[in-house]
Image (tube, rainbow, N blue to C red):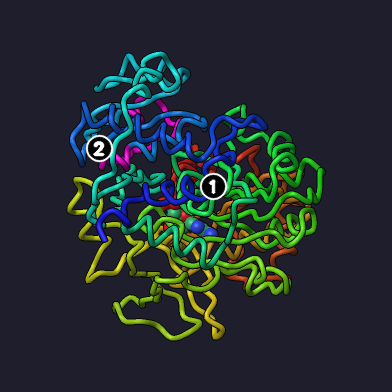
Amino acid sequence: MGRAVNLFATLDQAAARFGDRGAVYRGEQQLHTWSELRERALRLATSLRRSYAPGQRIAIASENRAELVELFYAVWAAECVVVPVNFKLHPREMVQILEDSGAATVFASPKIATELTPASPVVVELIGGLDYEHLLSAPPATVPSTDPSTLAWLFYTSGTTGRSKGAMLSHRSLTAMTVAHLADIDAPDENCSLLHAAPMSHGSGLYIAPYVLRGARQVVAASGAFDPDEFLDLCAAHPGSSAFLAPTMIARLVDTGRNGPSALRTIVYGGGPMYIDGLKKAMAAFGPIFAQIYGQGESPMTITGLRRIDHEGNDDAILGSVGIPRSGVEVTVLGEDGAPVECGQIGEIVCRGDVVMSGYWNNPDATRDTLKDGWLYTGDMGSFDERGYLTLRDRSKDVVISGGSNIYPREVEEALLEHPGVAEACVVGAPDPEWGEVVVAFVVGSFVVGSAADDALDAHLLDRIARFKRPKRYVFVDDLPKNSYGKVLKRELRARLG
Ligand code: AMP
């Protein structure tokens, strides 16, 4: 027991098995072998321990950089808690996270450090600077025996519905996530690569441990950002590439027109709705290489999932679902009375298992609302079908109740997106004296605004969904407001409606 649960064990194993092989790459350039990566992380861990006690929070605020891999492992080896901060946040929002987590220090890239230093409540360490190199000159640490409930990561949620909260993820939780990923979604080996395209502070960072455990190369784009052409070039340069991409990133890949690079092994998508139409286009462009995860910071990447093979039958009910419960996770749907509902009925999705967070950092009220009797209340609404596939409807807060009927915006959005003139659609409820709420659709597309456009969309929807679900109003916009993770901010759209 003990040490085996420290996530550092994943790197120990890779270094023992694949020592001289390439581990970390910036673009096409190899930076470190597995042995070197392990040694760098252990040297950093010694330096961290000299200044910080176990359990202290160490924040990281950086665009994607190769050093982040060694930093995560160094923090774990020092039994500290990593607090990755999304680099796209405003410095004020970053400071909020530093304060909320009580971080002892923050490692920042030069670019972020410039913006953050004047406002930061703690010392900002420059990643890759001279001081950083100095930290690497300490002797390698010995990794302690770590209790599985020790915190490893404070995962700040994207806060689409309010202020960001820190989900406490232990070594046990992230180990469960690692095992479930390898069991259900992708089983890479040492001849594979993980391309970090999404932010390593969140989506992509969670993938480090499973791919490290299997000795798959860690590849960070030289630009530190997601550029579809750079991404496709990297796929060609690195064998058996897998990556986690948010649905909007996949749409940008498809838009390049550079279809079917054979070196792409798996694209895992999730974190937000992938509409069937977009998924089919992506499969037509790149083949059956897609797998889906449904998770949240509170149950990192692991509630349900769809394997690659599940996509192959082109079955709309499956493609429109978020798949089946993941290994080691129990998932059920509860009605308003708190009891499990029948198959086909919609209710709140709850789950339990080792992967689930231990609570929100410093926020007992939010923890009490979210973790009850060992179950995580996800705040997502969904239903199971007879085959055991879960279909996500919407966040419970996003459901529109009009004239007493529940309308699930996602269904209306899916139907709108089937219209060739609609590029993006987002459906929200607006207060209405007669109906309680009415459906309003924000549409990005090629329409000449006016009654003809409204009529065309109405006619289109009448062929597809029940009359009462049709929007009472269409608002044509140039783009939809999104947060730094690319998630549409429904609350902003609602606010526009007054
Ligand atoms: P976050 O904690 O920021 O990762 O946000 C998690 C939320 O994103 C979930 O509660 C869902 O509402 C949504 N989400 C995650 N995965 C999916 C998915 N595969 N399909 C649709 N929505 C998703």
Q: Is mark 2 within 8 Å of ligand 1?
A: no
Q: Which span of residues is magenta-colored? A: 75-94
Question: Is 56 contained in the magenta span?
Answer: no
The residue under label 1 is: 18
> Where does the image place residue 276, in percent across and percent down from the top left?
67, 62
The residue under label 2 is: 101
Q: Secondary structure at mark 2?
A: helix
> Where does the image place residue 265, in percent across and percent down from the top left?
69, 54
Comparing labels 2 and 1, the label whose residue is closer to the camera: 1
Q: Residue at x 37, y 24 (%)?
A: 136
Horizontal side of residue 362 vs 221, given as left or right: left
Vertical order, 397 against 340 (above or below) = above
Q: Residue at x 62, y 39 (%)?
A: 479
> Where does the image place residue 281, in percent across and percent down from the top left?
76, 56
* In-front residue for pair 196/156: 196
Question: Is 89 contained in the magenta span?
Answer: yes
Mark 1 neighbour class, 10 Å CA radius: few under 14, some 14 to 19, many 20 or more: some
Task: Count the numbered circles shown.
Answer: 2
Vertical order, 462 against 175 (above or below) = below
Q: Amino acid at mark 1?
A: Phe
Vertical order, 380 against 10 (above or below) = below
The quadrant of the image that shows the N terminus is: bottom left
* In-front residue for pair 212/39: 39
Q: Taking the image as drawn, is residue 197 in sight?
A: no
The quadrant of the image that shows the C terminus is: top left
Mark 2 neighbour class, 10 Å CA radius: few under 14, some 14 to 19, many 20 or more: many
